[in-house]
Amino acid sequence: MAATAHAIVEDEVRELVRRRGIDPIAEPEAVARLVDEVLNDYHDRSITSSLPPMGDATLAGRAVLDAVAGFGPLQPLLDDSGIEEIWINEPGRVFVARRGRSELTTVILTADQVAELVERMLRPTGRRIDLSTPFVDAMLPDGSRLHVVIPTITRRHMAVNIRKFAVGLRSLDELVRVGSVTGQAARFLDASVAAGLNILVAGGTQAGKTTMLNALCGAVPARERIVTVEEVFELNLGLPDVVAMQTRQANLEGTGEIPLRRLVKEALRMRPSRLIVGEVRQEECLDLLIALNSGLPGMCTLHANSAREALVKMCTLPLLAGENVSAAFVVPTVAASVDLVVHLGLEASGQRRVREIVGVTGRVEGDVIETAEIFGTRRGRLERADGYPPHAERYAAAGIDLVRALGQGIDPAATTPATPATAPAASTAGR
C-alpha cells in the first residue's frame, strides 16, 4: 500500500529527531520546528514530483506533532480542557469523563498502539510495568496521573487511566467560582489553614479531594516550610518553600522500594512547618497521627463516605501498623490530632461539592469521638450549622476573628445566611 503524505512526513520527522538527538517529550518546541520544516520541504517537493497530496497542512502538522512529541491519538483528548479523565478498557473502547459523566469516544487504537503509548508515557518517569510489577502509577509531563494494569491481572487487555490535573483550581476562590464550596465556608477554611488547624479532606473517588487539598495549601502563609509526601506527584503548590517527595517502586532485584510510611518519617527530619500527605491508605496513618500529635500542623486526604466515616477510618488504619498498636491509643490520638474534616461528594449532575465541614472537639466517650457540625448540607446547599471549631486560641494567635471567619457579622448579601442546624451540634464518630 502506498504511503500517505502524513506517514511520509512523520517518518522524515522521526528520522531528523534521531539524527539531531532531540528528546521529543522534553523538547516539544524543537519537534514543532522540525515538523514545520519538513512540511515546507514536502510542499516544495510535491510540486515537481509524484508525492501524494498533503491536504490540510495545519491538521497534518498537528497530527504529526502529536504522534512524535505527544501521545498520538490520545493527545487531542489530553488537550481538551473539558475532559477530566481518560481511560482505555480495551483498544477499541476509549472513554472520557466530562463534568463527572463518562462518554465513549470515537478513538480506536490497536493493542500495539496502547502498549507503545504506555511505554512512551512511562519512559521519562523511570517507572516500569512488567509481569513482576503489573501495576504502575506515574505522572505525565502536564501533571496528569497515569495508572496502568496489565494482563493477567486484567482479563485480556491493558487497563489505562489518565486522571488529568485540574488546571486553574488552585485556590479556594477558584472552588467558590465553580460552585464546589460557598464563599462563607471558603473564608472559614482559609482562616483555619492560616491558624494551623489539622485538616482531613475526605470523599469518594473523583469527589475532588486532591483539588481541595491543593486549594487549602494555597492558604498556607508564605513564610512556612511545607513538605509534601505522595504516592505520585499530584499537588502543585505555588509557594516559595516547598519540598515534594513521592514513593518509589522496587527495582528489578526487588529492592529499593520507598513506601509512603518511610516518606512521612523522613519528612519529619526536614524541619517542616507543615506536613501534607497526598492520601493515607494504610499504616502510614499511624506515623501521620504521631506527627500531628507532636504539634506539627498537617493536612491529608482519605477515601470515606462521610466525615464521620473518615474519622472511623482514621481510627482503623493505624491498627495495620502492628499488633502492638491498639484502639485504646489510636482513638484518643485521632481525637486530639484531627481538628477539621472536610467531606466532598460527586453529585448526580457531575458537580463536585463540599457536603459538610465538622470540627473534632477532642473529647472521647468510650470509643466514640465527639464532633461538632460547622457547615452542613441543607436543602441541597452548604449552610452554616451551629457548631464551632476547636482551638479558638489558635485563630486569635493568628490575628483572626473567628466569629467573622464563620460568617457572623459579615454583609449577608456577600455570603450564605447562617441557619439553625437540624441536628444537635455535637455528634459522635466511633470506631
Image: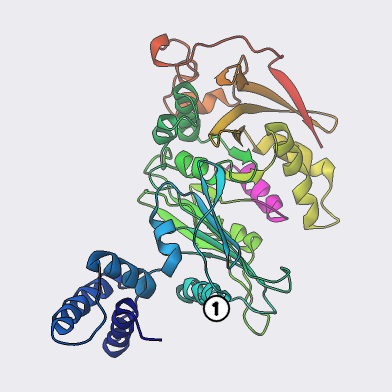
Q: Residue at x 78, y 39 (%)?
A: 331
Range of the magenta residues?
280-296
Front residue (pair 220, 8): 8
Quarter of the image where the N terminus is located: bottom left
Is residue 397 shown in magenta?
no
Sort mark 1 into few (<14), some (14-19) or many (20+) by Cα contacts within 10 Å.
few
Three-letter code for the amino acid on which mark 1 is drawn: Asp
- Counting from the top left corner in percent of width and height, residue 236 is at 43, 52
Q: Is residue 311 above or below residue 426?
A: below
Q: Is residue 202 left or right of residue 329?
A: left
| Residue 316 relative to residue 405: left or right | right
Residue 291 among magenta residues:
yes
The reply to whether residue 169 is in sight is: yes
* Residue that label 1 marks: 112
Residue 411 visible in image: no
- Residue 171 against residue 381 in the figure, above or below: below
Instruction: Tell me where residue 41 sits by quadrant.
Output: bottom left
Q: Secondary structure at mark 1?
A: helix
Residue found at x 47% / y 52%: 235
Q: Residue at x 50, y 29 (%)?
A: 181
Q: Position of residue 171 (x, y in %)?
A: 41, 38
State the scheme by which the image is colored: rainbow
